[in-house]
Amino acid sequence: MHTESFIVGKDASLEHAISTLQGKLEALGFHVEEHSWLNPVDGVWSVYLRDSDCPLMFTNGMGATKLAARASALGEFFERLACNDFWNHYYLGQQYAEGAAGRSFVHYPQEQWFELDEEDESGAWPEGLLTAELQTFYNPNGTIPAYSLVDFNSGNFERGICAIPCVRQRDNAVVHFPVNIIANLYVSNGMAAGNTPAEARTQALSEIFERHIKFRIISEGLCLPDVPEEVIARYPNIAAGIAGLRAAGFGILIKDASLGGTYPVINVTLLHPQDQGCISSFGAHPRFEIALERALTELLQGRALDALAGFPEAGFDLEEIASVPNIEMHFADSSGIVSWNFLGSEHDFAFCDWNFSTTTAEDCAWLMGAIHAMDCDIYVADFSHLGVYACRIIVPGMSEIYPVDELEFENNSVANGIREAILFLSDLDDEECTDLLETLNESGLADERPVAPLIGLAPGDDPFWKDLRVGELKTLLALAAGDDDAVVEGCEWIRDFEQIDPERRTVYNCIECLTKLNGDIGFAPALNSLYGAETVATAIALLDGELRFFGQPSPGLSLEGCDMHQRLLTAYGKLHA
């Protein structure tokens, strides 16, 4: 008789969860494959899972057993499907952005749209969007115009601002959050799928706690107390994994990150004796055992023992350590810098032997109560359209991954107004090329910024779109428009920027040389010897306007010819078929 496997914190057996999730994926038309199984030490497993039809859709699962890691990967795949996270960085194409696919919604059937008032020069945000208090929180100086909140995935200015209804937990009020704000500030934080709502919400809230407290500890350079060995010994499987890392020669610190028994967070830090690198991993859950296991498995997720080198050494500059780029690196893969003070022995808090709950219902209730006690509100969007419960939880003032001011200075909607022109690049006439060039010059976009992610295009292996930068695009527009000064300026920039296709870079070098030679044909033999006749011919054709944009076809708003992007759109169509 087969015995099912149950683990702490889950409301169904691993076998049941895996079977259910695999069956739901097959029914939806997704074909996932397991890759890169890792079991670097006892009690730590991880697996890389991806969709065989669209490799941009992937997850990493982790757990104390192979079954737990598989269930984790499948659960994460579902949370990303349900929360549309796989498409967060991409344009959804005209068929979904403008309703041409035969459905009235872009993101979810329950979404609500708020029209932009074109006559309102103040750029005031529409009434009914968020609450008055939240509008002040996200736009404290009133300097972010409403049009900046048009979502990146549709860029549909005519329809306006797309918002998702979320339920405020303290009073069940429904509040509409712009998709734009969710994508810019929260990304994947607070997403979860689970066997039950309580289980999934516990996962999402624990993740929010983990990152919030992690960022505070790192940015303030706090020194945490050690977890006593006798406490670790209560959990033999976890202790075995820690022992395995130490036996492999790594220094392993186990820290109580609860800040005096207040928060459900544990830290595991690895010190590499070969290159002095530090990897600091955090785990959170109201139950101590689960938080400790998560911190350890997160440390080794997707990493073999020989892949633990190359992380930064501890630092002394707390301003650098607390900087947004460093905190973002900690969010992405724990590769940011930690303070030397973090590694010290003068602890800022005493160790607390905490454990806050014993069931998933208690887990969820405790987490919500703790956040409400911090005077923060919890907003939950529930998703069950895929047959598996998933949710996205937002806690303003606590769960942001990026600073609120990025809505003004780094909003992903910055290219909404120029996406169409770029996707129709080869069809632009001279005047339109000049207009787009002027717009790019006035936008403040850095020349080295990649164009594909700027407009939400999945370039795949297309060499043109894969490494096209704003600076090169401006140079190509100048060539098409016959702006000689801008051509020279662009070629000079490209000469000093090496991350561009080598063949195209050589063409630009030739163009720069031709412009400085004033087209003197007496240098033709030398040019042909230096660059090759084909390169010289291409450079002359671009300068004369006979060739535009290297003959690259325009994908248009339907992204024609963009195979990888079409795969993403095909996958998106499966969600509400």
Image: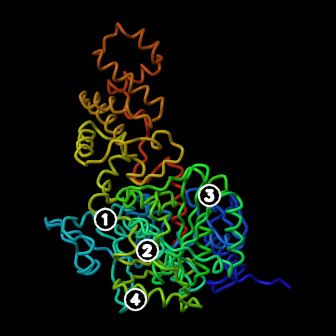
Q: What amino acid does circle 3 point to?
A: Asp
Q: Residues within 10 Å of mark 1 (few under 14, many from 20)?
A: many
Q: Which mark is residue 53?
A: 3
In front: label 4 or label 3: 4
Classify residue 61 as left or right of residue 138: right
Q: State the quadrant of the C terminus.
A: bottom right
Quadrant for the N terminus in the image: bottom right
Sequence-first tag of 1 and 4? 1
Q: Residue at 42% across / 8% down in the picture?
A: 525
Mark nearer the N terminus (2 vs 1): 1
Are circles 2 and 3 on residues that touch, CB within 8 Å?
no
Q: Is residue 383 left or right of residue 68?
A: left
Who comes first in sequence, dot 4 or dot 3? 3
- Rendered location of residue 140, percent (x, y): 21, 71
Disc number placed over residue 150 in the picture, else none: 1
Instruction: Give the CA separation, mark 1 to mark 4.
Output: 27 Å
Whether the residues at callouts 4 and 2 have beta carbons within 8 Å, the answer is no
How far apart marks 2 and 1 lie (CA) works out to 44 Å
Instruction: Find the distance from the CA under tag 1 to the CA under tag 3.
Output: 30 Å
User: Residue 432, relative to residue 403: is it above or below?
Assistant: above
Categorize mark 3 by other alpha carbons within 10 Å: few (<14), some (14-19), many (20+): some
Residue 483, x across and y down, in percent? 24, 30
Across and down, in percent, residue 31 comes to 65, 64
Residue occupied by mark 4: 169
Is residue 99 something one can see in this rendering? no
Q: Earlier in the sequence, mark 2 or mark 3?
A: 3
